[in-house]
Image (cartoon, rainbow, N blue to C red):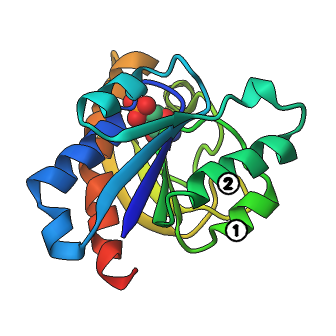
Amino acid sequence: KNIVILISGGGSNMAAIVRAAQRDNWRQRYGAQVSAVISNRPDAGGLGIAREQMIATEVVDHKRFDSREAFDEALGRAIDARQPALVVLAGFMRILTPGFVGRYQGRLLNIHPSLLPAFPGLNTHQRAIDTGCRIAGATVHQVTVELDLGPILAQAAVPVLPDDTADSLAARVRAQEHLIYPRAIAQLLPAL
Ligand code: GRF
């Protein structure tokens, strides 16, 4: 069972998933492995981390395509070449077309840094602070055509502290993301 992870940036969630797969021996337990990491940005920090872990990497640079459809088509070809049972978005910062989402329906996951359905979209931590939330968190969910609104698979909550900045809150939430994302994936693997 191949797992393909899509990133755009630092890849800390990707790294947490790769670590969990090794630590908990997903290969033996579920016959599963992270078989490729694909980035839409050539300069994504996560690409180096993946290479260090001997995982195949690939870049499908969205700037080389003149429409979302053309980019998604190329991305889909790169993904399909790996024959994935599961496609995992981990800090992948492109909105996907309905065609793409449909192609991977039921095996496409995302992590979002808020307690959905609160704060879909960007700048979640600043918005949570500005709204006066006492609790923030992260959500692992199935991807559907509506942005950040698919069925929820896992959540973790953290307190918002009085002196929090978006960065300090993001760091607290991020630590929880690294726990819940690998766990949510492991729970799905037996059924795939
Ligand atoms: C995470 O906060 C994730 O929830 C959001 O983007 C961030 C990605 O961070 N979708 P990283 O690239 O995994 O470090």
Viewport quadrant of the C terminus: bottom left
Helix, strand or loop at mark 2? helix
Residue 191 position by quadrant: bottom left
Measured as percent of width and height from the top left, residue 19 is found at: 19, 44
Establish if 146 lies above or below 48. below
Measured as percent of width and height from the top left, residue 133 is found at: 46, 37
Q: Which residue is mark 2?
A: 76
Measured as percent of width and height from the top left, residue 162 is found at: 33, 21
Three-letter code for the amino acid on which mark 1 is drawn: Arg
Residue farthest along the bottom direction in this orientation: 191
Tell me the quadrant of ligand 1.
Answer: top left
Answer with left or right where residue 36 lies relative to residue 97: left
Q: Nearer the viewer, residue 109 or 135?
A: 109
Q: Nearer the viewer, residue 131 or 63?
A: 63
Measured as percent of width and height from the top left, residue 62 is found at: 73, 30
Residue 177 position by quadrant: top left
Establish if 77 lies above or below 84. above
> Residue at 56% of width from left, 74% of height from top?
106
> Residue at 19% of width from left, 64% of height from top?
26
Q: Which residue is mark 1?
A: 103
**Mark 1 surroundings: few (<14), some (14-19) or many (≥20) residues within 10 A:** few
> Residue at 12% of width from left, 61% of height from top?
25
Please report whichever mark, 1 or 2, sits nearer to the chain's N-terminal start: 2
Three-letter code for the amino acid on which mark 2 is drawn: Gly
Cα distance in 3D space between marks 1 and 2: 8 Å
Q: Nearer the viewer, residue 151 or 85?
A: 85
Answer with left or right where residue 191 lies relative to residue 112: left
